Image (tube, rainbow, N blue to C red):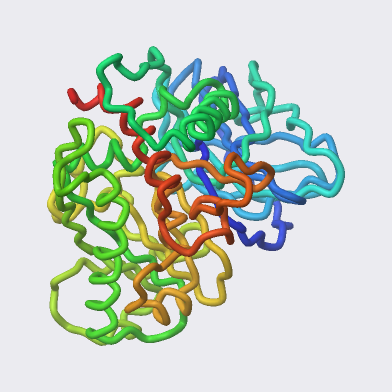
């Protein structure tokens, strides 16, 4: 879901037109590519590309491929620099992922647009050497997201003793949703993926750290900074509360309260932040996806082994999610990397009871699906079916709990 990653009304950007310059003197190459459509909507899609390095270690790489249809365009990419000329796409490494060991992988993702069909790209090559094994694409109905390639595992099933007791009217729709997810998650990664919000929460012992990516030209006061933190805490707890019955954890759920801490801000210009204390780390001018980003060395997305030895503040200053607040952005996006919404929307809803766009995208971080092209509960409305509800409904709660009962064995529960 890379996966699924996962997005509501993803706002497509203009396609790239600059052709990247290739580096000389590469090592010997052998590679295998897995390509999957992680999400598709009218005229747009999200895709993941995983490249396994089967030969010498790489110190700098360039991936090339071609779209079969002239209407297919890259709009926004991550984990590399994307360029497109005609149907040909070139992706060059980011600074932090230039080195790839023998047997290692390169994990990329992008959002794109199409005007006709959306066939699988062809001619994948790394540093000019053709790769093998491009997997067929699917058409899942989930939001796009940035995700590294997971390691396949045995698909767990809910134990016979699980307290699966949803309202009778929801049993069939919930079963349909889970079956749909099993069928649409690319390459069987529903169970193999290991960076859901669930994984991040348990890796951090029941707490979550955030980086705020301030993708705006506006200034931020100390009061706004603190209000953003408080709003994220309140909204996050709304999903966590779905796991409680009368204050007790449902089906062996261990956390009653989940502390949420903003540990960092990323900006283009330090002068935008009107505070001088060091309560949060500040990253200036580190631009990725054309937006400020906190240090990759501190990010869970980049270090799913929980090794934050390169993070200046260590594990205490690592961040699990990014809150990407983008000026002029409508709708939202969400995945294992975090959530993206408009900065104006977020600031204008700091005291709202339900920040429904943010809540929807946070649902994607925990694996919940999108429902652009089907409705398992016709006429009822629920948060994860964008536009049909403004708060977490009973159906959303039981979809959330269904994820927990299928994954909880990972965490010894």
Could you tell me how many numbered marks the image carries?
0
Residue sitting nearer the eye, 353 or 301: 353
Whether residue 110 is situated above or below residue 404 in the rendered picture:
below
**Residue under the point 41% across and 23% down:** 192
Q: Position of residue 114 (x, y in %)?
A: 79, 48
Residue 64 occupies which quadrant of the picture? top right
Q: Position of residue 258 (x, y in %)?
A: 18, 52
**Is residue 287 shown left or right of residue 182?**
left
Q: Residue furthest front?
A: 168
Q: Quadrant of the C terminus?
A: top left
Q: Is residue 207 visible?
A: yes
Q: Position of residue 279 (x, y in %)?
A: 14, 71
**Is residue 407 shown left or right of residue 105?**
left
Whether residue 398 is situated above or below residue 151 in the rendered picture:
below
Q: Is residue 50 visible?
A: no
Residue sitting nearer the eye, 356 or 271: 356
């Amino acid at each position: 879901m890379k996966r699924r990653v996962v997005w509501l009304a993803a706002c497509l950007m203009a396609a790239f037109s600059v052709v990247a310059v290739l580096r000389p003197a590469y090592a010997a190459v052998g590679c295998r590519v897995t390509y999957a459509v992680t999400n598709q909507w009218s005229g747009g899609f999200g895709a993941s590309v995983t490249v396994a390095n089967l030969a010498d270690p790489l110190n700098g790489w360039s991936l090339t491929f071609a779209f079969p249809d002239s209407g297919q365009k890259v709009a926004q990419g991550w984990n590399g620099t994307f360029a497109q000329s005609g149907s040909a796409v070139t992706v060059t490494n980011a600074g932090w992922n230039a080195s790839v060991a023998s047997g290692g992988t390169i994990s990329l993702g992008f959002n794109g647009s199409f005007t006709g069909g959306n066939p699988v790209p062809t001619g994948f090559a790394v540093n000019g050497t053709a790769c093998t094994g491009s997997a067929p694409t699917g058409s899942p109905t989930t939001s796009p997201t940035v995700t590294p390639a997971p390691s396949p595992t045995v698909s767990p099933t809910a134990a016979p003793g699980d307290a699966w007791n949803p309202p009778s009217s929801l049993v069939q729709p919930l079963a349909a949703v889970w079956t749909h997810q099993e069928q649409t998650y690319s390459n069987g990664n529903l169970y193999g993926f290991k960076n859901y919000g669930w994984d991040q929460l348990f890796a951090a012992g029941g707490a979550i750290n955030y980086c705020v990516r301030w993708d705006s030209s506006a200034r931020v006061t100390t009061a706004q900074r603190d209000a953003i933190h408080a709003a994220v805490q309140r909204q996050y707890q709304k999903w966590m509360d779905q796991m409680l019955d009368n204050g007790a954890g449902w089906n062996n759920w261990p956390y009653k309260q989940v502390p949420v801490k903003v540990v960092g801000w990323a900006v283009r210009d330090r002068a935008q932040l009107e505070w001088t204390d060091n309560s949060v780390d500040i990253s200036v001018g580190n631009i990725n996806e054309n937006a400020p980003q906190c240090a990759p060395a501190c990010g869970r997305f980049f270090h799913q082994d929980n090794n934050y030895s390169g993070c200046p503040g260590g594990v205490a200053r690592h961040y699990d999610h990014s809150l990407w607040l983008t000026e002029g952005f409508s709708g939202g996006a969400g995945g294992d990397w975090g959530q993206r919404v408009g900065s104006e929307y977020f600031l204008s809803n700091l005291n709202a009871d339900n920040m429904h766009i943010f809540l929807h995208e946070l649902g994607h971080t925990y694996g919940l699906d999108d429902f652009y092209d089907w409705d398992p509960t016709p006429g009822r409305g629920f948060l994860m079916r964008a536009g049909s509800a403004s708060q977490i409904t009973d159906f959303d709660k039981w979809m959330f709990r269904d994820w927990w009962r299928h994954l909880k064995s990972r965490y010894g529960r």
